[in-house]
Each structure stands twice: as structure tokens, then as C-alpha cells.
Image: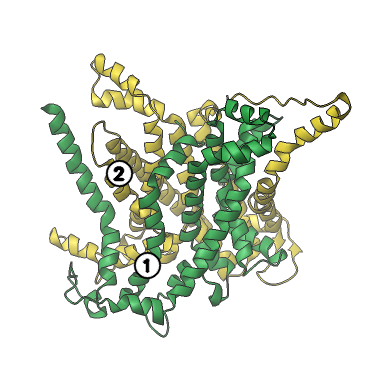
Chain colours: A yellow, B green
Amino acid sequence: MERTLAIKTRHAAGTRKRSKKWAKSVPFLLMLPALAVMGLFALFPVINAFRLSLFDKQLLVPGETFIGLKHYSQLLSSDEFRNAIRVSILYVGGSVLLQFIVGLALATLLSVHGIKGKRFFRTAFIIPYTLSELVVSLIWLQMLDSEFGIINYFVTLFGADPQNWLFDWALPAVIVANVWWGSTFSLLMLEAAMQGIPKELYEAAEVDGATSIGKFIHITLPSIRYVSLLNLIMITLYTINSFGIIFVLTAGGPVGSTDVIGMYMWRDAFQNMDLGMGSTISTLIFAVNIIITLIYIRLFGLNTLKEGA
Amino acid sequence: MANRKKLLGIYAVMSVVVVAVAFPVIWMFIMSIKSADELYQFPPTIWPENLEIGNYTKALIEAGIDKGLFNSLVLAAGTVLVSVAFSIPAAYALAKYDFKGKTILLLAILATQLIPGMAAIVPLFDILQRLHLVNTFSGLVLIYTARTLPLNIWILKGFFQSVPNDLIESAMVDGSSKLVSLYRVALPLALPGIGAAAMFTFIQTWTDFILPLTMLFNEEKFPFSVMLYKFVGDPIMGTNYGVLFAAASIGTIPTLMIFILLQRFFVQGLTAGGVKG
């Protein structure tokens, strides 16, 4: 923990009390603008989503009727919703696992002692991160095109038949596009963590005759525990809550095979104009976010998170 | 030498990875200089037989992408200003003052980062509607600010913590108050962190798509990303992929340049911030 400055009031006894009180409120005043914006636009939506989920409320139509938990019972008995949960688990699970593994592999490559041109390689690896979700989607939309796409050209080079990727392979296709885009973020975080590992640890292990794999398992992985936890939480939640790539590539189709929960929510709220139902799904997504975070913290131990704070 | 062989192997692997990672981006650029005929041809030509530079002028002049780029710039720059201006004092307070409930507050700030805004898009729409901020830039800037503040505060907190207290104390002995020493001593030393925070914020705002698609109705206000999307399957122009990818390439230049020129700040920002190892 850092040493905090002792605030010494060197005033006359009469003003001491007042200035002490003033000094105490300074940190809160400093934080006020940030906390106000976060409260209104990050915390309040969670509460507001729950409130709206109990009302029958249509988009752009004034007025709302209290209906209690009706939306929830409607959702839970809906086959479409169950499908969305199943697809989300596959999409998020696949994306997160691949994204973390690819990011970790790239970060490990970049951290190998003695390689030159690190800047060049890092820049090349990072390029996908600078593209917008939409541009990423458009590139993959074209590359996966069943008639003119370059992917089918590569496939035919290897003697296989061209595929209708966004129809027959829709879920794997959107996962690949998402992993291609998102792995760079994991790479960035994990590489930063690896840079912070003291070199002496590796040198000592070398003296003991440790292999590269041994060093990776016994030094690198434990040292990046905290960042890995943070990264896993961030990419999991980000993948649950984002659906831009799916929105553009498949819009949830064909026949619901890529209809993740975010896509389902957006459609209900903004296409079917049902703000109440959209908020119900939002509330459930928030609940899932919190549960997943708790599971991760449980798995890694709360101390890893506290160390960061 | 075994070590040398190992390094060569790593270079080989990295080169393959670089090609795989960079290929879709290079392909976007190649498609942006192909004529419409060549884009609808199988097998595709790897390098265009007829260069179609006109896609770029069409994107800028006929499709009016310049307006979208301007709107994106206003949104991203506005968010950077507000978010960084709000996160500096907050991060300083969290780094250099001691008060009750600080750890809980830090974890709470981290927790808002863990609940990304997309699940909140429906209730956010409702809030903006109540504040009469639907279809305005200010509404979007406030949402983006709320989204980027947690990471910015964490990054800057790390930098402020690394400013030695002795430096601040000696500035205070000189007669300046703690706040003045923030301005005079801590701020200049935290500049790389401010740079990192500004870049993260800019890129996140610039590349966002679903939020402006949902919150803005007025075509005059569309940022680049939404404009590009409306361009897909345009009833009048049709989807001209050549022009589309020319526009996409132009829109990628700002973030790409920022990254290539200032990537060191990114890594530094992540290392010094909340994600230190």
C-alpha cells in the first residue's frame, strides 16, 4: 500500500477545526464529477432496468403499466429465450477460451528473451484492435461470402468443397471473427503483465536447469494470475454484452443458430418496440454478469483481486 | 547453437502469425482498390488487375463519408475531454488521500467496468429519453464517459501513485497547497498515463457502433460507423463493396495511426495502471 500524505493543518487553533473538516471533504469533491456520471450512466441503468422490467412499456410511447413479474414468466417459458441462452453459452465459451489462449500464446511469443523487432511484431498483432466492430464485421462478411469470398478460394486450394459459411457454419464463423478481433486485447494485457515479472526469477530457474515449459508453468503463469483473472472477466463480460459482429454477419440467423442473448434483447426492445421486455432481458444479463464475476473470483481467490486494489 | 535455432523457430512462427492476423486488414485494403466487376469474380484476384482508385473519391465525395468522420471526431474528442478531465481529480484523490471506504470504492469503480454498457442499452435509452438527450451528441458523450471512466481512473491512479510523496511534500513546503502540487508536480509526471487514458477512450469511442445506431435517428448526426452501416445495401447505390471498403479503410486510419505511433503509452498505461502484474 502506498504511503499517504499526512495532512497537517498548521493554522491557529481557532481555524483548525473548520479547515480540518474542509480538508476531509477534498477527496470527495475531487471524485464528485466522475462518481456522478458513473452513478447516473452506469449504476442507475441497472436499477432502472429492473424497475422497467416490472412494467408494460412500449418504446417511444408515453405511459407504463405495472405488471409485476409477468415478463419474467413469459421469458422463462419461451423456447426462443432458451435457445438464446444455449447459443450464448456456446458463443461466449468458445470465444473466451480461444481468445485467452491465442492472446496468451502471442504474449508468450513476444516475451521470449532476446527477440528483435518486438515493436514491429506487437504492432502487427495489435492491428485488429484498432478496427471498429463494424469494419471487422464487414471484412469477414465479404471474406466468408459463399460465392465470391476469399475463404472459399483458400478452401478449394486444399481440395475441399466451397461452403456456405454464414449458413451452415454460422456459429463457428462468428466465433472466428470475434476471436480474430478480440485476441489482441488479451495479448496487450497479458504481455504488459509478463513485462512486470522480475528477470531474476527466470535466471534463478535457469541455474536450477529449468526447461522453457517448466519456467512458463512455474514462473510465468503464477505471476500473471491477477491480470489473467481480470482479463478473463473482462473478455467474458464483453462477449456476453456485445453483439455487433453477429448483428452484421447473421443478425441471429439462420433459424436462431447465432441468436445470442444481446441480439435477442436488442430485437425485442428496438424492433418489437417492447422496452419492458428488453429491460427484463437486460436485468437477467446483469444478474448473469455478477454471477460469472463471482465464479471467477472464487476460482482465483479474492486475494488476487484485492492485490490489485 | 541451440539458442539461435530456437530464436529462428520463433521468428518463423511469428511471421506466420503476423500474416494470418494482418491478412484480413490487407484484404480490406486490396478490396478497396478493386473495381465492382472484379469484386464479384471467383476465384478472386489476389492483386487487382484494374486499379480502381476512384472508390476513394466516391466514398469521400459522393457518399459523404467526410461528414460521418467529422461526427465521429466530435464524439470521440468530446468524450476524451470529459472523461480525462473527470478521471484526473478522481484518480488523484484515490492515489494520494486516505479516507474511509476507499478500498470498497475502488472495487466498486472496478465493478462498473465489469458491467459493460451494452446490456444497459435499453435502460440507458429510457434515461436519455427522460433527460431529453436521445438523438444528441451530449447524451452519447455522457454514456461513453461513464464507460471509459473506470479504466481511466485505474490507469491514472497507478501513475499518481508512482509520483513520490516527497516531491509533493516538498512542493507543499514551498507554500503550495496539495491541489496546486497536483497541478504542478503530479500532472506533468503522469502525462504518459493521461496519454494512455486519452488513447483508450478515443479508440473505444471511435470504434463503437451499436450504441450510436440505437441512440441517434438523425442522419446528419451519424458517426462514421453508423453511416458505413447504412451504406450496406443502400437502396439507391446498392452495396458497392469497393466504395464500402474504401470508406472503411479511411475510417481506420485515425485509430491505426494512434496505435502505431503511440503504442508504447498503451503498454506503459496498462503496466502502471490497475492491471500491474
Q: Tell me where residue B245 appears, x and y as whole percent.
A: 33, 70
Q: SS at mark 2?
A: helix
Residue placed under numbered mark 1 in the picture: B250
* Residue at figure coordinates x 63%, y 50% from the top left: A42
User: What is the residue that sits farthest to the right in this orientation?
Assistant: A14
* Residue at figure coordinates x 81%, y 27% from the top left: A11
Q: Tell me where residue A46 appears, x and y as whole percent.
A: 65, 51
Q: SS at mark 1?
A: helix
Q: How many marks are shown on the rendered structure?
A: 2
Q: Is residue B114 visible?
A: no
Q: Is residue A82 visible?
A: yes
The quadrant of the image that shows the N terminus of chain B is: top left
Q: Tell me where residue A44 appears, x and y as whole percent.
A: 68, 51
Judged left or right of residue B72, residue A62 is: right
Residue placed under numbered mark 2 in the picture: A119
Judged left or right of residue A190, residue A280 is: right
Q: Tell me where residue A262 appears, x and y as whole percent.
A: 51, 57
User: What is the residue that sits farthest to the front in this orientation?
Assistant: B174
Count neighbours of disc 1 (C-alpha within 10 A) and say few if under 14, some if 14 to 19, many if 20 or more. some
- Mark 1 falls within which chain? B
User: Which label was assigned to residue B17?
Assistant: none
**Quarter where residue A116 is shown:** top left
Count neighbours of disc 2 (C-alpha within 10 A) and say few if under 14, some if 14 to 19, many if 20 or more. few
Q: Which kind of residue does numbered mark 2 sit on?
A: Arg
User: What is the residue that sits farthest to the bottom in this orientation?
Assistant: B236
**Residue in the foreground of this view, choosing between B50 and B213:** B50
Q: Which kind of residue does numbered mark 1 sit on?
A: Ile
**Residue in the foreground of this view, choosing between A79 and B89:** B89
The quadrant of the image that shows the C terminus of chain B is: top left
* Residue at figure coordinates x 48%, y 42% from the top left: B192
- Mark 2 falls within which chain? A
**Residue in the foreground of this view, choosing between B238 and B94:** B94
